[in-house]
Image (cartoon, rainbow, N blue to C red):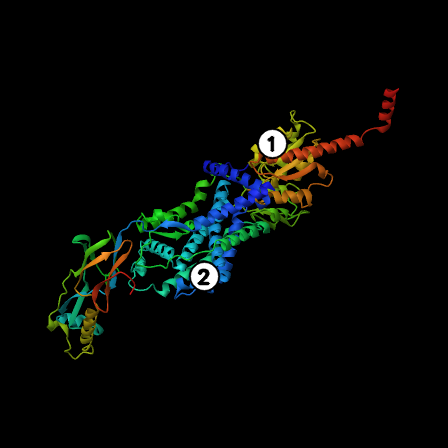
């Protein structure tokens, strides 16, 4: 009987230990600092170099690929700078995603900073100058080939992409009060096409 | 002889043996939860599936936190079920770890058992990830901490075009798709567990999947009472903009976080993979190369094709094949051992009446030769009790036997003991034979105690012959390190057999002669 009672108590004690370990306090963010979270994704601007094909080159192209003006390019690089009270926290070069860097670029940084009022500056500036092609190279709608409208369509597409791309320079310079154990989010909104600072859900 | 233990196994076994002894005293070997760790884990998996399906009915992907909060607020239909689900997952993790430790300590991790070990480690990992996703489903503060930590590790893999952790940045509400994927993983992983479990036991015959009813319902009942008595409370909802100083966490599934958070995501992920990989590679470290036990062999001339060895083999390593060559008057089939599956337990030697099978040097015939040698020993005290037990229990049984004026006779495993050995000992004039087998669920060869019991008492093939007086033979289950328990069993048996001898002495008295002598003395 005594042995059974001890056995029962041991079983109850074991379950109590399981319950205790199942609901323990785990330190998550013990310091009283804040976090500046810089996070967004956007389409980078495309940087292209265009040139007019010579007649010989033009003739060598297969019929379905004939265009007077051919453009090659990649996406622009951007520099991210984050400063708190004019102290540089981050400087980094950002490129588009993917092996060819032709996908959306993203910024994702979490910076632990002391809490309290602070001047927060975030700059996101294009490094590569967009090589604006000679206007005479742009649209080549001349010619009697079957593809004469293609250049115009591609120009339209290029303009649309440019309009969707992130602006060449984004800057936010603001004074915020960084609360202990709170996050200040710096993000880019497609709608406003500018950086914004938030400290709570929209 | 059984393969010697490695130093790591010996060290682990010492701790395990002490715990076994304690739990045997408290609960008896039939209900010792340490012996049943694997089956308890399976039973708890069943509890998790049943409670999980119930909880799933109330879970809403669009409002995960609110739906769980509603459920938690309902004491009759929700809270205790959630509590039981949670505590059962914790207890399952403990049971799996104990089971893993037990198999390591008993040297059951290598050779033909490597598949069971590797799949066991896989099941452990799956259970762990399953618990992880379960806590993320709740989407409270602990949920987002786990989700962000998981995302941080996943982002170290070069497979995502954007960091997963941005899903929790607060730019926009967390997508319902995330909760769907998480829930899908939480529901699909148990299917993986079922497949893994099937693989895990695929190389053993008659796998025992559930513990004895008393123990199973005892564990489930205790967890249910705990779930009712200590209702769960909801933590604050997950927020991308709040960093809690601490969160209410289940340490069974988050004990690693204080370490991992100090490491870069890639290093933390690689460390987790490395730990499980090392665990999975244990069979490579524990395998015996020099002392590799030899597989059983069949003497086809002696094999009568009775199939008993194929029935008794705990690992399904023996099959019947058509007899090669000239059959003559012999059986159409003979046994054939698959060396890749044979763990050299020797149980087939005990199952074969004509002594045709067994590992080299351990067949029935070898056992008979050895016991004859033992009985010829001049130091042997005729009329004493012989205790037959396995190598693992040698220490406890030798000490206990010596203190009770008995003799210990070691065999590889009680299940490999041929009943002719028992008969020979009894016929040699010994007072009785106590077969001290390990508790059934603790047999290193799985079914040794079960088969020896059947052969002694229930006429299973290779049975103890009827001519052997059963009162002079006893089967006792003794823990391998339990000297006190062994002494008690030996003392009880010795007293009973001594009483038999006394009764026999009385039966053999010549009454007339005794009366005459007594009358003469009186005169």
Badge 1, how many Cα within 10 Å: few under 14, some, many 20+?
many
Distance of mark 2 from mark 1, alpha carbons?
58 Å
Q: Say whether marks 2 and 1 touch (CB < 8 Å).
A: no
Q: Quadrant of residue B421?
A: top right
Which chain letter goes with mark 1?
B
Q: Residue under mark 2: which chain is it in?
A: B
Numbered mark located on residue B219 in the image: none
Q: For mark 1, give the secondary structure.
A: helix
Q: Is residue A20 visible?
A: yes
Residue B436 sits in which quadrant? top right
Where residue B220 appears, as percent x and y from the top left, is 54, 53
Label 2 Cα crowd, 10 Å radius (few <14 / some 14-19 / many 20+):
some
Find residue A122 and report its horizontal and vertical position in percent. 19, 58
Q: Please say whether residue B357 is visible from this viewpoint.
A: no
| Residue nearest the observer in this picture, A16 or A58 | A16
| Image x and y of residue B461, in percent | 67, 45
* Residue farthest right in this picture: B523
Q: Which residue is mark 1?
A: B400
Q: Which is nearer the N-term, disc 2 or disc 1?
A: 2
Please, what secondary structure does the residue beneath circle 2 have? helix
- Which residue has dot 2 on it? B73
Residue B478 drawn above or below residue A97:
above
Task: Determine the residue positioned at 39% across, 65% down.
Answer: B63
For the C terminus of chain B, the image quarter is: top right
Q: How far across and down, in percent of the image, does residue B159 sit?
A: 32, 58
In-image side of B448 versus B107 (left or right): right
Which is in the foreground here, disc 2 or disc 1?
A: 2
Closer to the camera in the image, B22 or B45: B22
Quadrant containing the N terminus of chain B is top right
């Amino acid at each position: 009987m005594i042995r059974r009672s001890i056995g029962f108590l041991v079983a109850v004690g074991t379950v109590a230990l399981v319950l205790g370990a199942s609901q323990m306090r785990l330190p998550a963010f013990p310091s009283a600092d804040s976090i500046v979270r810089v996070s967004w994704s956007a389409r980078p601007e495309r940087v292209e170099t265009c040139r007019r094909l010579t007649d010989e080159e033009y003739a060598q192209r297969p019929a379905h690929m004939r265009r007077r003006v051919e453009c090659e390019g990649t996406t622009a690089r951007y520099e991210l700078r984050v400063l708190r009270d004019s102290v540089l926290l981050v400087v980094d070069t950002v490129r588009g995603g993917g092996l060819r860097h032709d996908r959306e670029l993203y910024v994702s940084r979490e910076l632990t900073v002391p809490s309290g009022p602070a001047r927060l500056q975030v700059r996101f500036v294009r490094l590569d100058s967009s090589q604006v092609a000679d206007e005479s190279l742009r649209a080549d709608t001349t010619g009697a080939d079957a593809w004469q409208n293609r250049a115009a369509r591609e120009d339209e597409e290029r303009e649309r992409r440019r309009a969707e791309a992130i602006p060449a320079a984004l800057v936010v310079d603001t004074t915020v009060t960084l609360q202990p154990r709170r996050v200040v989010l710096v993000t880019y909104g497609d709608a406003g096409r500018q950086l914004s600072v938030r400290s709570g859900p929209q | 002889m059984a393969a010697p233990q490695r130093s790591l196994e010996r060290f682990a076994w010492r701790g395990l043996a002490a715990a076994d002894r304690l739990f045997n005293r408290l609960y008896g070997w039939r209900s010792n939860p340490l012996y049943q760790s694997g089956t308890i884990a399976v039973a708890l998996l069943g509890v998790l599936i049943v409670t999980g399906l119930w909880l799933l009915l109330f879970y809403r992907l669009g409002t995960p936190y609110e739906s769980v909060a509603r459920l938690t607020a309902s004491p009759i239909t929700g809270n205790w079920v959630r509590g039981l689900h949670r505590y059962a997952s914790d207890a399952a993790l403990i049971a799996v770890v104990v089971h893993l430790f037990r198999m390591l300590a008993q040297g059951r991790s290598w050779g033909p058992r490597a598949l069971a070990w590797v799949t066991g480690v896989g099941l452990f990992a799956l259970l762990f990830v399953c618990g992880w996703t379960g806590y993320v489903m709740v989407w409270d503060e602990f949920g987002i901490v786990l989700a962000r930590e998981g995302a941080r590790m996943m982002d170290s893999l070069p497979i995502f075009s954007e960091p997963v952790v941005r899903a929790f940045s607060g730019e926009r509400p967390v997508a319902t798709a995330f909760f769907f994927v998480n829930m899908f993983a939480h529901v699909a992983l148990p299917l993986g567990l079922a497949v893994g479990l099937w693989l895990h036991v695929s190389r053993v015959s008659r796998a025992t999947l559930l513990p004895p009813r008393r123990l199973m319902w005892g564990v489930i009942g205790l967890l249910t009472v705990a779930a009712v008595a200590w209702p769960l409370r909801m933590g604050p909802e997950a927020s991308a903009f709040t960093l809690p100083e601490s969160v209410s966490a289940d340490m069974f599934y988050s004990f690693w976080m204080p370490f991992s958070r100090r490491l870069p995501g890639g290093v933390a992920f690689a460390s987790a993979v490395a730990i499980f990989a090392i665990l999975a590679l244990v069979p490579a470290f524990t395998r015996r190369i020099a002392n590799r036990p030899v597989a059983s062999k069949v003497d086809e001339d002696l094999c009568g094709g009775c199939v008993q060895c194929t029935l008794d083999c705990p690992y399904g390593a023996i099959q019947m094949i058509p007899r090669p060559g000239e059959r003559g008057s012999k059986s159409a089939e003979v046994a054939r051992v698959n060396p890749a599956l044979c763990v050299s337990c020797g149980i087939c030697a005990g199952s074969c009446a004509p002594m045709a099978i067994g590992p080299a040097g351990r067949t029935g015939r070898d056992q008979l030769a050895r016991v004859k040698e033992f009985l010829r020993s001049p130091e042997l005290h005729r009329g004493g009790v012989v205790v037959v037990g396995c190598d693992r229990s040698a220490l406890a049984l030798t000490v206990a036997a010596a203190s009770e004026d008995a003799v210990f006779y070691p065999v590889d495993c009680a299940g490999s003991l041929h009943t002719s050995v028992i008969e020979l000992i009894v016929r040699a004039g010994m007072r009785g034979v106590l077969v001290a087998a390990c508790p059934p669920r603790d047999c290193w060869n799985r079914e040794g105690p079960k088969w020896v019991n059947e052969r002694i008492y229930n006429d299973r093939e290779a049975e103890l012959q009827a001519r052997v007086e059963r009162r002079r033979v006893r089967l006792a289950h003794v823990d391998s390190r339990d000297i006190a328990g062994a002494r008690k069993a030996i003392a009880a048996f010795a007293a009973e057999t001594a009483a038999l001898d006394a009764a026999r002495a009385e039966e053999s008295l010549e009454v007339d002669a005794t009366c005459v002598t007594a009358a003469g003395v009186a005169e």
